[in-house]
Amino acid sequence: MSVTGGKPLHCLSFDVEEHFQVSAFWSEARRQQWDKYESRVENNTRKLVELLAQHDTKATFFVLGWVAERYPDLVKALANQGHEIASHGYGHELVTTQSPEQFRDDVRKAKSILEGLTGSPVWGYRAPSFSITAESQWALAILVEEGYRYDSSMYDRFQRSENARGSNRIVQIDTTAGRIWEISPSTLNVCGFQVPVAGGGYFRLFPYATSKTLLQRLEKQGVKLVMYLHPWEIDPEQPRMGGPWISQFRHYLNLQKTQERLSRLLTDFRFGPMRDIVCPVSVMYQEKDLLVAVTEK
Ligand SMILES: [Zn+2]
């Protein structure tokens, strides 16, 4: 664990998508209307970037290909400010509802769009709603084949585990196509159950003092925290979507409190992008040179 600056370095990430693209409100009919809804992702992401700058913090942004096509300057600005650009796929469809061929097309298209904008290799992937599960682990080999170096899509929340440190893992997984890093969002083992403490709706559900206590407990165990949030989670003014009450409750809970909580989180803990934590700097630069060489041919 890095202790530069006196505090351990943890992973912070954002899934850059519109408020109407979340899986909880997904329907095929709504998917056809995406271009007609009010877009709020650019403003919300720029607010996040300002907040990160105030705390001198860099993060990983898993950008949806659909968003990158519409806001290329946003992606370029994130990269220019030193944040890591990673892939959230193109169309925000669950891995579990895609065929391997559809999944390959989706992650290839997103990677190509993002790399075309930044000129740097995209190494990371996060599936919509953490949908790489035991049943869809075939996706990992495809990610390796498509040039991804790490995945952050496996989230063992509420599963049973005997491991006292929870399901926290930054590990290499062997696939039929080669190795890939898996960086799972943090959970805390409470009575044998993996309680999610890493962000999103759980970060909005708990009072900040509770989140801080749970995260500090993990930190003391030597666990590298892996946190995630979405730009729409700092936007209490977003238009309300129709859907099941449980989805509405989870999506709209405490939106007005997230920004202030995130600010406190950035004060109390030290974060960086996933790429820097997983991969040595020397390898990063070699890769960048390779990409330039390939592009210039
Ligand atoms: Zn998403």
Image (cartoon, rainbow, N blue to C red):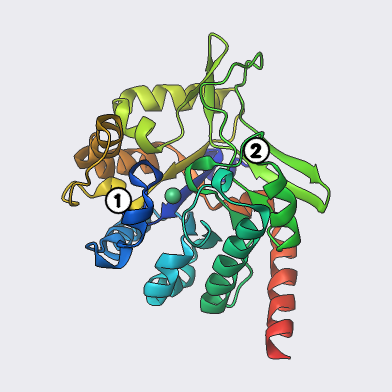
In the picture, measured across the screen, residue 148 lies left or right of residue 71, that is right
Residue drawn at (44%, 38%) of the image: 269
- The crowd level at tag 2 (other Cα within 10 Å; few <14, some 14-19, many 20+) is few
Regarding residue 45, the answer to whether it shows in the image is yes
Q: Quadrant of the N terminus?
A: top right
Helix or strand or loop: what does disc 1 sit on? helix
Q: Quadrant of the C terminus?
A: bottom right
Query: In the image as oriented, which residue stretches furthest toward the top?
Result: 191
Helix or strand or loop: what does disc 2 sit on? loop
Q: Position of residue 283 (x, y in %)?
A: 75, 63
Q: Position of residue 2 (x, y in %)?
A: 63, 42
Indicate whether 187 appears above or below 267.
above
Q: Which mark is residue 1?
A: 2
**The one of 232 and 47 positioned closer to us in this rendering:** 232
Q: Which callout, 1 or 2, points at the residue further toward the start of the chain?
A: 2
**The one of 214 and 134 positioned closer to us in this rendering:** 134
Query: In the image as oriented, which residue stretches furthest toward the bottom?
Result: 297
Report the mark closest to the observer, 1 or 2. 1
In the picture, measured across the screen, residue 169 lies left or right of residue 190, that is right
Residue drawn at (24%, 31%) of the image: 245
Task: Report the amino acid beneath label 1.
Answer: Trp
Q: Position of residue 249 (x, y in %)?
A: 25, 32
**The one of 145 and 233 positioned closer to us in this rendering:** 145
Residue drawn at (47%, 40%) of the image: 227
| Mark 2 sits near ligand 1, with its Cβ under 8 Å away | no
Task: Report the amino acid beneath label 2.
Answer: Met
- The crowd level at tag 1 (other Cα within 10 Å; few <14, some 14-19, many 20+) is many
Regarding residue 71, the answer to whether it shows in the image is no
Q: Which residue is mark 1?
A: 232
Indicate whether 25 appears above or below 83.
above
Residue drawn at (56%, 78%) of the image: 116
